[in-house]
Image (tube, rainbow, N blue to C red):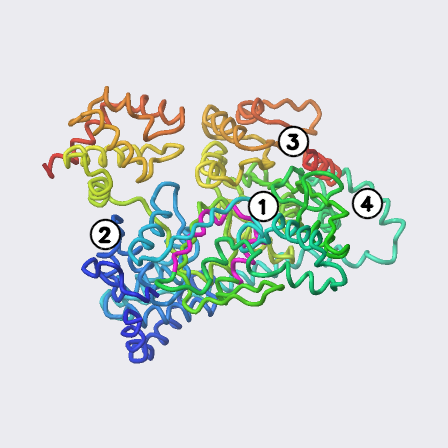
Amino acid sequence: MAATAAPAAMTTTAVAGAEELAVAFARVLRGAGLSVPVSTVVAFTQALGVVGMARRDDVYWAGRTTLVRNPEDVAVFDRAFKVFWERATGSGLDEPEPEPLSITLAVDDDDETDGDDDPPGTPNDDPQVELRFSTTEVLRHKDFAACDDAELAEAYRMMARLRMFGSPRRSLRLTPARRGRPDLRRTVRAALRTEGEPLRQLSRAPATRLRRLVLLLDVSGSMEPYARQLLRFIQAAVAGRRRVEAFALGTRLTRLTRELGSRDPDRALAAAGERVVDWSGGTRLGDGLRTFNDDWGQRGMARGAVVVILSDGWDRGDPDQLAEQMERLGRVAHRVVWVNPLKVTPGYAPLARGMAAALPHVDRFVEGHSIDALERLAAVLAEP
Amino acid sequence: MIAAPPADDSAGSADSVAGVSAALTAHGYLPDEGLATAVFLAISLQRPLLLEGEAGVGKTEVAKVLATWSGGELIRLQCYEGIDAAQAVYDWDYGRQLLHLRAAEATGETAGRSTDALEAELYQERFLVKRALLRAIERREGPPPVLLVDEIDRADDEFEAYLLEILSDWQVTVPELGVFHADVPPLVVLTSNRTRDVHDALKRRCLYHWVEHPDLEREIAIVRLRAPHVTEALATQVAAAVQALRALSLYKPPGVAETIDWAAALGRLGIERIDEASIRSTLGTVLKYREDHQRVEHHGLAEIVRHAFEHAAPRS
């Protein structure tokens, strides 16, 4: 008790300045793009009350432990803190920082441009039901690269309706079943109804559960005709069920799960588009996969999961490295599926160096150029 | 809150960051400033502490040391997929309940008694099996326990929601018995290897610290502390060699636990100066992937040895 009495007394004196500092700093962090809920600002204020505000390191660590919740955010936090602390204490150069508002504006811009894609498709919704049915049939097989805006809008609607069930597996959780292990909990409950005589012996058995689904989308220049459409597909998958993870692979690896989690596809895509900085750049699949394996896959995200790589296999990196990383991925994943939108091209042979290197380690090699192909992909993913 | 003063007060106290740092050190854990601040805040703000970091950087160890320091019981909940309330909070001892029913029936006690009365008899505290979370918030004498929720990322998200509820209110409701409430909340340490993101709501409830590999000086000190039979010269060489290995972009860079193991293994073999042969024969204590062994061989063991002594030289 004595240990906390002193800091509590300190809090009252320190809190006046602490509150202002915490709120001001939270605003800077939000401007820099971090999510800073009010509850964490309160925690920061309390933390300042206990460690004091005299030492830079104390304030820094109080902020780090209360305001940062992901290691990726540490770099942003560090930059923001440096600027903020120098301004607050006047210890650094008094160089005006660009207003963080511009970032918010960029989001709005993206929202608008993305919103513009939709209206062309909307008007022809109701009046021509039959006609729409037949266009649907044609559209199902139409290559995304050949679709115009209206057709794409329709295709997106179909994607949103695609249900990704994914591969089932036995879970450790037990559920009531006709046969299996004895379920004493329910047996006792049933016995109570028969004056303590366990007449009915109930049992339970392992439930089934969906495997985690990990989607890796190649966003390099050669994938340009397909990447945005496939991102829609991925968004539908992420928003549609739990335990789905999404990444963009280009010259670097970008995790998109959180951005794509929003139910509103336009907003989700705008957020994801902003997050990926290397759209239509080069590809180094091997490097990207290695980062995935190192930072996510091997730790557990890919373990027992169904991993889907959506890429044309054009790769500027070292094919040996790609093969090595694919092998590594194959060792932890339940199944590796490669989706190549170019596979449907007549006379296609996996000549791209990357594709040739990766193929021996791929369990299923499928196409992904149209709605129909994506429906078949969903069926492949649902195989046990 | 560490209500009762720690067993040996000389070791530092919970009322400042420096005090926490000294106390952890005295009990065999060398924290850096960030971790010491996080622990200090967790104690004084009574918030759970979420530690994330690579495997083997000593996340679990923090909870163990906190328990020895505070004198509270260490209650460990190892999470795994499919863990549910029956395994983490409480369960009823159904076997004994059934026996009780049979016994009551055999002596003719059940005759003419209502189902409600029978039920009330069965759902008493003596048939309750308390699991880790319930034990952690149970009323008790002495210092509050340290609750270690290990590898929370392995549990599923339903369980996280349950945990969040307990960590916010410090209470558990057993419908048949009533509410268990902690007067003094336990000190809670959660660890995660980040195989998936822990839900944001749970993260907001916690203080967060990303545990890094220690720097060279600290790692030498840790080896000296945890493997006392190892000479300072050897500890320095091993720590420097491990730093060199971490720079090699291996699949699984060695953690502190591996450094300690390696130093202990070399010490046990009676080696005083590491060389290529001794590294090769003991590399299995540090690197656990065949590819990593190949990479190190390819890079050259001589290079690792050189690095080990380069850093060791100014100290000895």
Check disc 3 and give the amino acid type: Leu
Please report the residue visible at 53 percent of the width from the left and 43 percent of the height from the top.
A248
Q: Secondary structure at mark 2?
A: helix
Q: Secondary structure at mark 1?
A: loop
Is any part of residue B7 visible from this angle? yes
**As displayed, is residue A21 above or below residue B248?**
below
Label 2, label 3: how far apart the Cα atoms are: 60 Å
Q: Which residue is mark 1?
A: B82
Q: Nearer the viewer, residue B137 or A151?
A: B137
Label 2, label 4: how far apart the Cα atoms are: 69 Å
Q: Which residue is mark 4?
A: A136
Residue A76 at x, y percent in the picture: 39, 56
> Residue furthest toward the top?
B277
Is any part of residue A225 visible from this angle? no
Q: Secondary structure at mark 3?
A: helix
Label 3, label 1: how far apart the Cα atoms are: 40 Å
Range drawn in magenta: B145-165
- In terms of image quadrants, where is residue A214? top right
Q: Nearer the viewer, residue A251 or B109?
A: B109
**As displayed, is residue A103 above or below residue B51?**
below
Label 1, label 2: how far apart the Cα atoms are: 37 Å
**As displayed, is residue A315 above or below residue B34?**
above
